[in-house]
Amino acid sequence: MSCTLSEFRKREIIFAAGDQTQKLPKLISGAAILFSILPDGRRQVLDLAGPGDFLHFESDGELDHFAEALTVCEVAWYESADLLKSQDTALFLMEQMRERLGMERRHITMLSRKSAGERLADFVNLAADCLGRDGDRFELPLTRQQIADFTGLSLETVSRTFAGWERSNVLTKIEGKTYEMRPGLPTVA
Amino acid sequence: MSCTLSEFRKREIIFAAGDQTQKLPKLISGAAILFSILPDGRRQVLDLAGPGDFLHFESDGELDHFAEALTVCEVAWYESADLLKSQDTALFLMEQMRERLGMERRHITMLSRKSAGERLADFVNLAADCLGRDGDRFELPLTRQQIADFTGLSLETVSRTFAGWERSNVLTKIEGKTYEMRPGLPTVA
DNA sequence: CGCAGGATTGATATTACTCAACCGTGGTGG
DNA sequence: CCACCACGGTTGAGTAATATCAATCCTGCG
């Protein structure tokens, strides 16, 4: 299967809403966030992506969201026609889309009725999954604002909640953006 | 393309989480809600479906959500293998999944930072689209609780918000579950 | 060293939730 | 045929959670 590879630096935009596309981008390594910009200028973070995740499924048309590299990342660009040629790869693509749909639905559930603490605990687990853990340690290469835009909270609430966790020793900042978690975070439903 | 047809009455369960499936259900007529049940017993409404919408994309495995008929509805059950055989229908299926993904992302955006009024205005528009409008009139065959479970609000807040709209004449209850809207609902982003 | 952007913290305001009582209606059975 | 019941819906009072506004603090970097 032919595809081209490209690399992005941290904070680089991988693609923007409004771009025309003919290829499907798959994240090979690193992590990215998907977001849209609302009419009032606010950003809504839609999803996190890790290695193996497709960043969009628009095979031919205009993109409706942005993707930004959270870390250095490699992206493979596939021809969607190639992927649909064989039933195997079509099935694989469908599986990918279904997983993404499941992610979005968990996101909906998280936003729907959970408290600030529960949302952030969900987020931390999700982020650790996407970005990789080293034992109990993980990195959060996102700004407070990005975390707020993912969890639907204000950045102050994000900050206060993390501070509370650090005070009660369920979370420790090791250095920079690296944290270590201990059992005791609100349960993830 | 071979497929079987079945019909459901209002409030009937079309399929349940945990069911095994080999077929993809497409709504031909009527409307349905998709929801999941959380560990604490609460229901989370994930989506509304109207004519032409697939109710899930699980081609072979266990379902993770429920579908319930909001009105009388007809459902066509397709073999997923059939749909993936030709590139045309595979592309069509992919388009359907992409649209569903877009719906979920709008849902995320709605839940993320909007006020009760904005969420319900979004919901009303979405519901009118799914369930069909007759000019400015539309039906809402959902309970207050279901609307609350979709918008992430309490049923009391849903009730109060509708009551407020009726008082200010931006929404009128015609009879039963039929409403008429007038310009003036919070803008949909 | 100084600057800029992000992060933290505090005080206050607001929104929507919770708890609780009450209403309306459709259906059932005496 | 009517009374009653059950369920969904409405309304009110009080509260709790989180947003907002504002001041200050880090930290990485030129």
Image (cartoon, coloured by chain):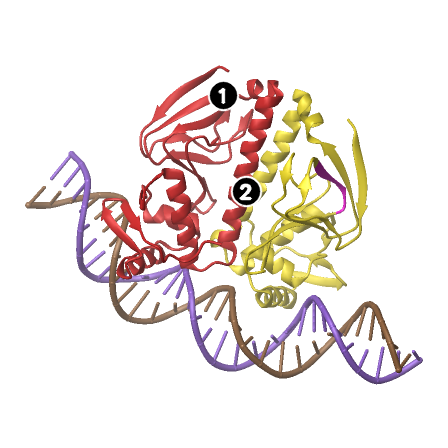
Chain colours: A red, B yellow, C brown, D purple
Residue B26 is covered by the magenta coloring: yes
Work out whether residue B167 can be spotted.
yes
Secondary structure mostly seen in magenta is strand
Neighbour class for label 1 at 10 Å: few (<14), some, many (≥20)? Answer: many
Residue A17 rendering spot, x and y as whole percentages: 47, 33
The residue singled out by tag 1 in the image is A78
Neighbour class for label 2 at 10 Å: few (<14), some, many (≥20)? Answer: some
Mark 2 belongs to which amino acid? Gly
Camera-side residue: B104 or B63? B63
* Left or right position of C26 against B103: right
Query: Which segment did they paint magenta?
Result: B24-30
Residue B28 rendering spot, x and y as whole percentages: 76, 40
Q: Residue at x 57, y 66 (%)?
A: B157
Pointer 1 chain: A
Q: Residue at x 31, y 58 (%)?
A: A165
Residue A88 rendering spot, x and y as whole percentages: 59, 22
Residue D20 rendering spot, x and y as whole percentages: 38, 60
The relative height of residue A120 versus residue A21 in the rendered view (above or below) is below
> Pointers 1 and 2 in contact (CB under 8 A)?
no
SS for dot 2: helix
Query: In front: mark 1 or mark 2?
Result: 2
Mark 1 belongs to which amino acid? Tyr
Task: Tell me which label, 1 or 2, sits earlier in the chain.
Answer: 1
SS for dot 1: strand
The relative height of residue C30 versus residue B65 in the rendered view (above or below) is below
The residue singled out by tag 2 in the image is A102
Camera-side residue: B123 or B32? B32
Camera-side residue: A129 or A47? A129
